[in-house]
Amino acid sequence: MTAPTLVFGWGNPSRGDDALGPLFVERFEALAAIHPEWGEVECLTDFQLQVEHALDLQGRRRVLFADASLDAPPPCSLVRIVAARDASFTTHAMSPQAVLKVYADIENGEPPPCWLLAIRGERFELGEGLGEAARGNLAAALEAAAHWIEEVPER
Amino acid sequence: MSHELETASRPETLRRVAIDPVSRVEGHGKVTILLDENNKIHQVRLHIVEFRGFERFIQGRPYWEVPVMVQRLCGICPVSHHLAASKALDVMLGIRQITPTAEKVRRLMHYGQMLQSHALHFFHLSSPDLLFGFDSEVALRNIVGVAAAHPEIARKGVLLRKFGQEVIHMTAGKRVHGTGAVPGGVNKSLAAADRAALLKDVYQMVAWSREAVQISKQLHTATPALYDVFGNFRSNFMSIVAPDGGMDFYHGALRARDADGRLLFDQVNYQGYNDLIEEEVRPWSYMKFPFLRSLGKEDGWYRVGPLARVQNCDQISSPLADGERKEFVAYGKGQPIHATLAYHWARMIEMLYAAETIKELLHDDDIEGSDLMVTGTRQPGEEAEGVGVIEAPRGTLFHHYRVGEDDLVTMANLIVSTTHNNQAMNTAVREVAKKYLTGREITEGLLNHIEIAIRAFDPCLSCATHALGRMPLEVAIVGADGTLIDEVTRDHRGLTRALA
C-alpha cells in the first residue's frame, strides 16, 4: 500500500549545506514516528532529483519536496508548485517542477498536490559539515513542515 | 594530434565569449572562446572552474569507510566509486579473488549502474539535441521537451533508468549510500524475491535497449554528413578488457590502441598504471591532462568511455550487443570511428550489453549464494597499497590508496573518466568551434553546438552540488578593450534575458 504522503529530500550529505535536504527528511521521519495523527508518511532521499522520481509520485495524495537553496529567503520558503516545462538547465539534476511535468506526460494525468520547502543554505564545499546558519534554518523548516502536514488535508 | 587553438598569440586584442557553466553536464564547466573583430576564432578552452578536493576528502579516514564515503564524490555514478574503492582495498588486503557470489553481486550492481546512467544520458540528456536538432528552441531541448513530443520514448527512458536503480537498490541494500561491497566481498547477496522481481522486468529492458540502439544507429546512418563529421578528430583509445580481449565493465587489464586501431599495449596489469600514464597540469584548468608516457604529451592523450570500449574490445560476450558492435565496427570500413557523436551509438550498444548481462546474472544461482567474504593477508610494511580500476559509465576510473599501519588512508589518487577525456573534450570543442562558429555572429543555437560536443562525452565535471538556483548559464561577450558588449543569462527556470 502506497503511503498517501511523500516527503522527498535531496542533496549530498558531504557537501556542507547541501545536506539540508536529506537531514530534513531524517528529522521529519523521526517526528512522523511520534505523530500518528499525521497518517502514513513515506520519507525518501536521494543525491539529486531525476526523471525516475516521477514514479515515486504515483498513488500519493500530497507530496513535500525539500532541498537546500541559495535563493530562498532565510530560514526557508514553502510554496505550492505545479508541473512546469522549465529548462532545468543545470546539471544531471532536475527541478521538482520538471519532475511533475514528466509525471504528467508519462502518466497522462495530473500529479498529486506538491509543495517545495526550500531551506536556505550558504556553503556547499566537499567535506564540509552543516553551517551554523543552516542548522537554524533546518529547525525552522521542520516547524514549517509540521504546520504543513497538519493544515494540508489528504485529498 | 596538435593543440591548435589552445592558446592565442595575443589574447588581449581579442573578444571573449564564455559559456558558463555548460548545461546538462555534471558540475562546473566553462567554455571560453576568443574572437577577433571578424569573428575568427583564436582560442577555445574548456575550463574546470571548481577544485574537486577528492583526495583531501579521503585522506586520514579509516580504510573500511572509504567504499561508502567515496559514493559522496559523485551523485551521478556513486556505484562506480564504491566498487573501484572496494577493488583497490581488496588488493591492499592481499585478496586475490573474491567469492563467485561476491563477484557476481558486484557485477550486477555495476551493470545496473551502467544501464541507468546510459539510459538517462541517451533518453533525457542528449536525445533533446538528437531528436529536435541542434538549433532547436531552448525550451524544447530538455527532458520535458522530449516527454511532451515523444512521450513513449521518454517513458521507456524513465523505466529503464528506474530498473537500473532498482538493481542497485537490491544489491547495495539502500537506494543511496549503499554498503553492498566491502573490502573482501559483499555484505549481502540478492534476495530471492528481489531476483524474481528483476527477472520479471529484465526481458522488457533488453527489448527497449535494442530499440535504443536502433534509434541511435538510425540517427547516425541517416545523416552521415553531420554525424560522421561533427567534432571528428583522431585520438588514441584506452579501456580495460577481459583476458580474452572481450568487453568487461567490472574487471580486466589495460589495453590502448592508436588512432589507426593498432595496439599500443595490451593486458597490462593496472597496478602499475603510474608507469603508463602521466598527468600534466596546465595553468588555466583545475582538471589535469593525462597522457600515455610512451607517446609523450603531444601525442599521448586518448579517449575513454563508450567510443573507446566498443572499438578497443575484440568481442562482447552477449550476443545481441556483439551483433551491434560488429555493425558499428563495419561502419568504420576498417578504420576506427572517431566522430564525437558516435559516442551515442556506442553508448547504446553498451546499454544493451548491460541489460543482457543483468539478465544472464539473474539466471545464475550464485547470485543468491551465502559465501560472501574472503579474508587475506595485508601487505607487509608500514604502508599497504592497492589500485582498483573499473569501467564507469563515462570511462575508465582509477582509485589508488595507501594505508598506514593505523588503518588510516595516507594517500589517495583518483583519475576519473572525465579527466582522461579532458584533452579530447577540448579538442572536440575546438573542432566544432572552428567549423561552425568561425566568421559568424554567435547565436544561442551556435553555442549549443559547443555544448553538444561536450555532452557527447557525458562528462561528470564535478560532483553532486545542485542547490536550487545555483547554476545559471551565462554567455558574456567582451570587447577587445575589456568592456562588456552583451550578456545573456538563463537560469533553471529557462529564462533568457539580454543585459547589455
Image (tube, coloured by chain):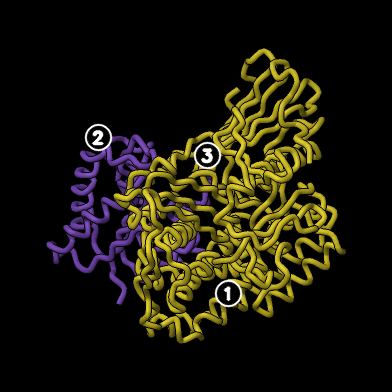
Task: State the image coordinates of residue A100 (x, y, percent, origin top left).
Answer: 44, 58
Task: State the image coordinates of residue A75 (x, y, percent, origin top left).
Answer: 26, 38
**Chain containing the residue with disc 1:** B
| Chain identifier of the purple chain | A
Report the residue at 41% width, 43% height from top: B468
Task: State the image coordinates of residue B249 (x, y, percent, origin top left).
Answer: 58, 66
The residue mark sitting in front, 2 or 1, is: 1
In front: B495, or B353? B353
Q: What amino acid type is highlighted by mark number 2?
A: Ala
Q: Colour of chain B?
A: yellow
| Residue A133 circle label | 2
Disc 2 vs disc 1: Cβ atoms closer than 8 Å? Answer: no
Report which quarter residue A89 is drawn in.
Answer: top right
Dot 3: what SS?
loop
Which residue position is annotated with label 3? B28
- Name the N-terminal-most of marks 3 and 1: 3
